[in-house]
Image: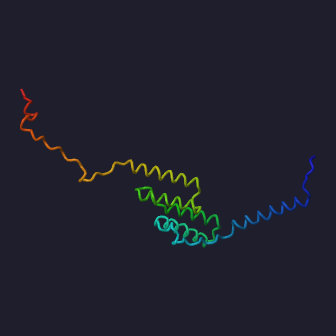
Amino acid sequence: MSQSNETPTASTTRETARAKLAKMVQEALVAPAKPAEPFDLSCPAAANPAIARCSLAYTTAHRLAASEGENKWESERAAKVAYRNAMPALSGPRNIRDFIACTAHAMLIGAINASDGARLLYAAQVAYAAHNAQPKKKDKSSAKTAPKPPENEHISPPIRNLITVE
């Protein structure tokens, strides 16, 4: 049989520490979350309306979940879902740029983790490439006009006159 190097006091202290940690985790799970701080409209990111919209959705959802008694993790989850739902669609160059800005901002504030953010940025890159691959509409002013007939048309007869039907 192997003898334990721990004294009964060390073993008891370790069990007490584990019990305290378990109690703290349990309390954190059932304790209501603190409401999110309001989105600071004076920060540079607020200059982009898409980021302001996503951030407002994030703080509003977090506050609502906290006021309904949800715990910290459930409030955060609701806020993250609201942020993603408020992001612009990947259609058109402006929306794609706004989507990239929202994704980067979400990664900075922790609303989107790095691996999901990388996937979203790749999706934006593909959407941008697909948009650029579409043929562009031509303006009427830049459209080519039919060539003018040669000035010396009177010298050579038209081809239809050379064809004889027998």
The image shows residue 110 at horizontal and vertical percentages of: 59, 61
The image shows residue 59 at horizontal and vertical percentages of: 56, 69
Q: Quadrant of residue 36?
A: bottom right
Residue 118 to residue 157: above or below: below
> What residue is drawn where x is 49% and y is 60%?
101
In depth, the one of 55 and 32 nearer the eye is 55
In depth, the one of 144 and 155 nearer the eye is 155
Task: Name the side, left or right, on which 153 lies relative to 102.
Answer: left
> What residue is drawn where x is 9% and y is 34%?
160
The image shows residue 135 at horizontal and vertical percentages of: 34, 48
Give the residue at the far front of this rendering: 152
Please state, as top left, top right, bottom left or bottom right, where the C terminus lies in the image.
Answer: top left
Colouring convention used in this rendered image of the protein? rainbow
Q: Quadrant of residue 12?
A: bottom right
Residue 2 to residue 8: above or below: above
Q: Quadrant of residue 11?
A: bottom right
Give the residue at the far top of this rendering: 166
Task: Name the side, left or right, on which 32 lies relative to 41.
Answer: right
Residue 109 to residue 42: above or below: above
Task: Name the side, left or right, on which 133 lies relative to 152.
Answer: right
Total marks placed:
0
In depth, the one of 75 and 153 nearer the eye is 153
The image shows residue 96 at horizontal and vertical percentages of: 44, 56
> What residue is drawn where x is 13% and y is 42%?
149
In depth, the one of 27 and 112 nearer the eye is 112
Residue 64 to residue 149: above or below: below
Task: Name the side, left or right, on which 68 lies relative to 161.
Answer: right
